[in-house]
Image (cartoon, rainbow, N blue to C red):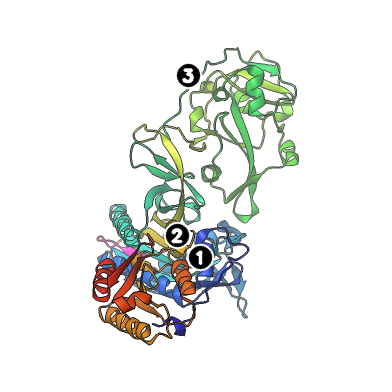
Amino acid sequence: MRFSKMLIPTLKEAPKDAVLPSHIYLVRGGFIYQVASGIYDFLPLGKRVLDKVRAIVKEELDDAGCQEVQLGFVTPADLWKKSGRYEKYGAELLRFEDRKGNEFVLGPTHEEMMVELAKQFVNSYKQLPMNLYQINLKFRDEARPRFGLMRGREFIMKDGYSFHADREDMVREFELMEATYRKIFTRMGLDFRVVEADSGAIGGEGSKEFMVLADSGEDTIVVCEGCDYAANIEAAKRRKPETDAEAPEADLNRFHTPGITTIEDLAKFFYVDPWYLIKAVAKKALYDEGKSEIVLFFLRGSDELQEVKATNAVGANELVDATEEELEAAGLVPGYMGPVELIRNVGALEGTPPFHEEKAHLNVRMVFDEGLKDAKNMICGANEKDYHLVGVDLTVLKDLEFADLAQTQEGDACIRCGGKLAYTKGIEVGHIFQLGTRYSEPLGATFLDRDGKAKPFVMGTYGIGVSRLLAAVIEQHHDERGSIWPVSVAPFEAVVIVGNVKDEAQKEAGEKIYERLAAEGVDVLLDDRTERFGFKMKDFELIGFPYAVVVGKKLSDGLVELVDRQSLEKRELPIDEAVTQLLEKVR
């Protein structure tokens, strides 16, 4: 290919809304062009990178025994209703009707469609296991598209789905896909971690994310300094924390605390460590069909609520802040909320001043963090303005609902080895799930087992953000000049730059080097433009081709320059030696 014949519109200025290096360099380097919010065209260079990423994904998946298909981008809404995700997925699911009034969605993922396919054509255990995948367009109506390809509305994704006769075989395939994904991302030159993750709207029994480590990543990852444990902050677990702080000693009673409504002020007021305070976080949980309820989440004052964990704990579609009016209507007193009625109902407040009778049966769900199990000597809100309870003992209470609610913090102990946990940032590029029968059961997708009985498929699902990978690669591989593409996914492995195309000797030498490299199978570009030499070199650095052979003034001495984009090292070499060394590098 010749630079002069290609559409490569490099730019000097970055887009006004671009803040990440990947967004800046993909636009400035002529890889992508924005046509609407969160929607991008791939220009020739971008399409070449996309194709190389796709090829690596396909090669490894095919080698693992997966089969490629291509499903419709438009999905009948009825399938989503049957699976229970039509409302649960939320506003990001773009719904529409055709001219006949039939309801459809633009697929952000294709579990329902692939299950329907298997339902039609896979009917016996003899056809299992089976792993089907596609690399196709998706649409997710993001509220705030940003960061270029990192968080767009339209994107290209590899989504795969495996079907099994039992859970053991599904777990085997899950582990095979983890190993396969490791190969894929390693081939792309990425530094990544495999982390425990929350399954989100996909659902299922467990999942893992593949995170490319980058300071610009949107996801916070919890990693252990002593072992290989890693988890997304939304799913991270820790050993049960302990404290050396002295416990407050008091008999159970109400205590006047005028104007004290925060954990910080309460700790100062009683001169106690927040560990011994019960924090109440009130949320409004939203469910299907417009249903909702007020939920009080209780945890230690030294902890913070992890909202994804809290959402999962109550099975909600979403948690939103409850207004003071809603809390008061439910019989709660903002700033002084506590598990008062639970304590009262088991007689634990016997001998203390009476509570308001009308608040004896609040229609409020209460969930306690696991860190509060067996908690004693606690202080919590009395659900009465300007009053708290001291000497609270949760061990006397029965039928409390416990869940993992607290966000894992830096310095907490690793659940595996007890080592110190720390935070880092990552970009999610892959996610694999153990679905079980989450979709096969509601969609009626069954097979006949060895005994001739109908059973639902046991499933796994496996995704890779193919278009997002372009951005992830650049976030790890760039400098102040531009992108630095790894050879495996570079738009071209090398570029031959003719310093002055008006110089016939340089032009002829450049042509010959280009032809030799192409004949050897190198994916090479010839920069034969009439632009100034400095301009060409800036484009080389901006676009990020791994290597350049520069034919310039030293040609009269039989020398050319071999330039390494990673180090920007320039070596003057005889033509034959430059070609030989370049071949060794790209191979």
Task: Indicate the position of residue 458 as horizontal and vertical percent values.
Answer: 35, 57
SS state under label 3? loop
SS state under label 2? strand
Q: Does the magenta stretch include residue 449?
A: yes
Q: Is the magenta stretch mostly helix, strand or loop?
A: loop
| Residues packed near mark 1 inside 10 Å, few (<14), some (14 to 19) or many (20 plus) | many
For the residue pair 133 and 96, the one nearer the viewer reads as 133
**Relative to 489, 358 lies left or right:** right
Mark found first going from the N terminus, 2 or 3: 3
Mark found first going from the N terminus, 1 or 2: 1
- For image coordinates 35% across by 85% down, the residue present is 505
**Relative to 394, 240 lies left or right:** left
| Residues packed near mark 3 inside 10 Å, few (<14), some (14 to 19) or many (20 plus) | few
**Relative to 331, 559 lies left or right:** left
For the residue pair 528 and 15, the one nearer the viewer reads as 528
The amino acid type found where label 3 is placed reads: Asp
Dot in front, 2 or 3: 2
Q: Name the residue under label 2.
A: 478
How far, Cα to Cα, is label 1 from label 3?
51 Å
- Residue furthest to the front in view is 557
SS state under label 1? helix
